[in-house]
Image: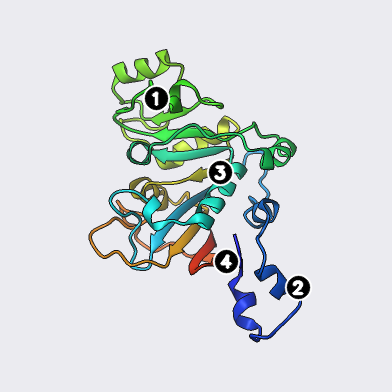
Amino acid sequence: MRRLFPVTDQTSRPADAAGPAAEAGDREWSLDELAEAYAYPPMGPDGHWLRANMVSTLDGAAQHDGRSQPISGETDMRIFGTLRALADVVIAGAETVRQEGYRPARAREAFAARRAAAGQGPAPAIAVVTSGMDLDFSLPLFSSPLVPTLVVTGAGAPAERVAEAERAGVEVVVAGDGAAVDPERAVRELAARGLRRQLTEGGPRLLGQFVAAGVLDELCLTVSPMLTAGGAQRIAGGPSVAVPHRFAPALVLEEAGFLFTSYRRI
């Protein structure tokens, strides 16, 4: 990663400026520096923090040909890995898990000491949100994870599919009275299991539900310098809110035309 720097540093200094800010902009940021920049805020004993990580093109597309990878880039994936390495749990919708071919999160030596100091396990758990339980429990995500994968569903989910998940050794978290998942309850149930540093990677439908429920604390958004047109989804879809939620910028970085931003709820 080269020339990753706060945009305010770049735009506020003359082109010939020298000094630490200029030097920092011309070198690769270490993973430790990225981890510090994206660190979770302090939380009380019963607290939790839900952040989302999404990528969008300039014209608002969250995907191209159904996947996010074509609009991503090397630095975006580096930050993607950093955000995962800071989280207790990665929350994703079942459709995203299928489309993106989710595999178990892996332990990364670069973050091992940081995770140990924070009382975290070697890698984040993956929590799959689903109402229909239409999942293949023989896949590595469920059959051989480093940290057990969870399935978050409602009390009205198909009983035979719940039983199949449990036979496969998957922990089923009930977070809704019907088949659908209650976003607020899902956040609470995961936090009650010690998974307080929460990261959702969507997809757009799941993120839209978190937004509508008012439980999203932070959005880490990569703005890709691409235009796709077409009818691709936005980063959040589904139900709308009566009054738009206001967020404040916490971080803005730039590299190779990509903007890496973080906005936190006011």
Look at mark 3 in the image and give the residue it sits on: 84
Q: Residues within 10 Å of mark 2 (few under 14, many from 20)?
A: few
Q: Residue furthest top?
A: 167
Instruction: State how far apart marks 2 and 4 are (Cα).
Output: 16 Å
- Which numbered disc, 2 or 1, marks the residue that appears first in the sequence? 2
Amino acid at circle 3? Arg
* Closer-to-camera residue (90/68): 68
- Which numbered disc, 3 or 1, marks the residue that appears first in the sequence? 3
Look at mark 2 in the image and give the residue it sits on: 20
Amino acid at circle 2? Pro
* Closer-to-camera residue (180/257): 257
Instruction: State how far apart marks 3 and 1 are (Cα).
Output: 20 Å
Q: Which of the 4 image quarters holds residue 28?
A: bottom right
Q: What residue lies at 37% left-to-right and 46% top-to-bottom? A: 203
Disc 3 to disc 2: CB gap under 8 Å:
no
Q: How is the image coloured?
A: rainbow
Where residue 72 sits in the image (x, y, percent)? Answer: 43, 56
- Which numbered disc, 4 or 3, marks the residue that appears first in the sequence? 3
Q: What residue lies at 37% left-to-right and 68% top-to-bottom? A: 58
Where residue 51 sits in the image (x, y, percent)? Answer: 52, 50
* Numbered disc 3: secondary structure: helix
Look at mark 1 in the image and give the residue it sits on: 139
Disc 1 to disc 4: CB gap under 8 Å:
no
Where residue 234 sits in the image (x, y, percent)? Answer: 33, 58
Amino acid at circle 1? Leu
Look at mark 4 in the image and give the residue it sits on: 253
